[in-house]
Amino acid sequence: VVNMVWHTFWASNKKEIDGKAKRYMAIDKEKHTNLIVTNGPKESEFAFKETTFHPKDPSLGSRVMRLSDSVLLEDVDVEGIEVGEDIVLLRWGVVKITKVDGGLEGEYIPDGDFKTAKRKLSWIAEVKNNCPVVLHEYDHLVTKAKLEEEDNFQDHVTPTTMATTEVIGDAGLANLGEHDIIQLERRGFYRVDKPYRGKDSPLQLIMVPDGKAKTMGGLQGKLAHH
């Protein structure tokens, strides 16, 4: 039996890579908001937190995440945020928002309750050794799953089939090799097209479709998700 439905193929592919793909985070270079964690460590302290590459498989190893009193969040993630609200910075902990107008500020709560916080957000410490990344997305060439004989091909050509987004990734991304497959948490799976070679030669990642109509964490790319 040959299955020619693409989303079914990509869903099967996801099952193969999900358990092996190491997890990282990245934030949009242009569309981000700065959060000041008033009791967080200064960049000069070089504070970090160790976390596993995969939440369900510690055998894949661990990495360190830089911590800082200044972190970057996605603009879309902080829409409607209110003073007094608890948010979760994934793999770090709970932060209570103390100021919204005139700049976002919050206080790290060491014993905060993850379960009661509605927003569980990806983030990046605003530090010098972050890794510049370019994300590449590709769409289907035609907008219709199956063209009929009476269809005019030109009427179903996808107007935009490629898009790129610049993001700021954590430092560990700089160590990836060509063809490595990873997951950017809340964004999706990616394959390394070109490794990081310096600030003028950022890491190039190609999105791997996962068979779903929406991203796993709500961070949509520029094209339709597949």
Image: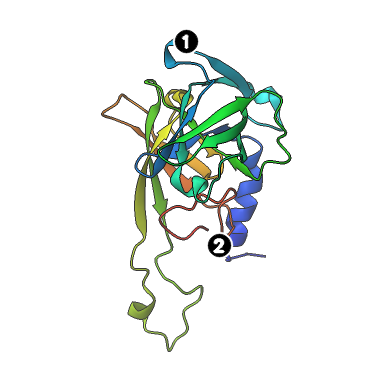
Tell me if 189 is positioned left or right of 192 in this view. right
Within-10-Å neighbours for mark 2: few <14, some 14–19, many 20+: some
Give 67 or 110, whichever is nearer the viewer. Answer: 110
Q: Secondary structure at mark 2?
A: helix
Q: Which residue is mark 1?
A: 45
- Residue 160 picture location, percent across and down: 34, 63
Identity of the amino acid at label 2?
Answer: Trp
User: Residue 106 placed where, x, y %?
Assistant: 54, 31
Question: Which corner quadrant of the image does residue 177 belong to?
Answer: top left
Residue 6 seen: yes
Q: Residue at x 42, y 11 (%)?
A: 44
Q: How is the image coloured?
A: rainbow
**The N terminus appears in which quarter of the rendering?**
bottom right
Q: Is residue 225 or residue 66 the one in the foreground?
A: 66
Q: Is residue 202 above or below residue 190?
A: above
Q: Depth check: give the residue in front, 2 or 94.
A: 94
At 44% from the left and 32% from the top, the residue drawn is 169
From the image, tell me which residue sits under label 2.
Answer: 6
Residue most extreme to the top: 45
First reached walking from the N terminus: tag 1 or tag 2: 2
Amino acid tagged 1: Glu
Other-residue count near label 1 (Cα within 10 Å), few / some / many at <14 / 14–19 / ≥20: few
Look at the numbered disc 1 and give the secondary structure of its residue: helix
Residue 90 makes an appearance in the image: no
Q: Residue furthest left?
A: 200
| Alpha carbons under labels 1 and 2: distance apart | 49 Å
Q: How many marks?
A: 2
Residue at 70 percent of width and 35 percent of height: 114
Nearer the observer: mark 1 or 2; the answer is: 1
- In the rendered image, residue 60, in percent from the top left (x then y), is placed at 65, 25
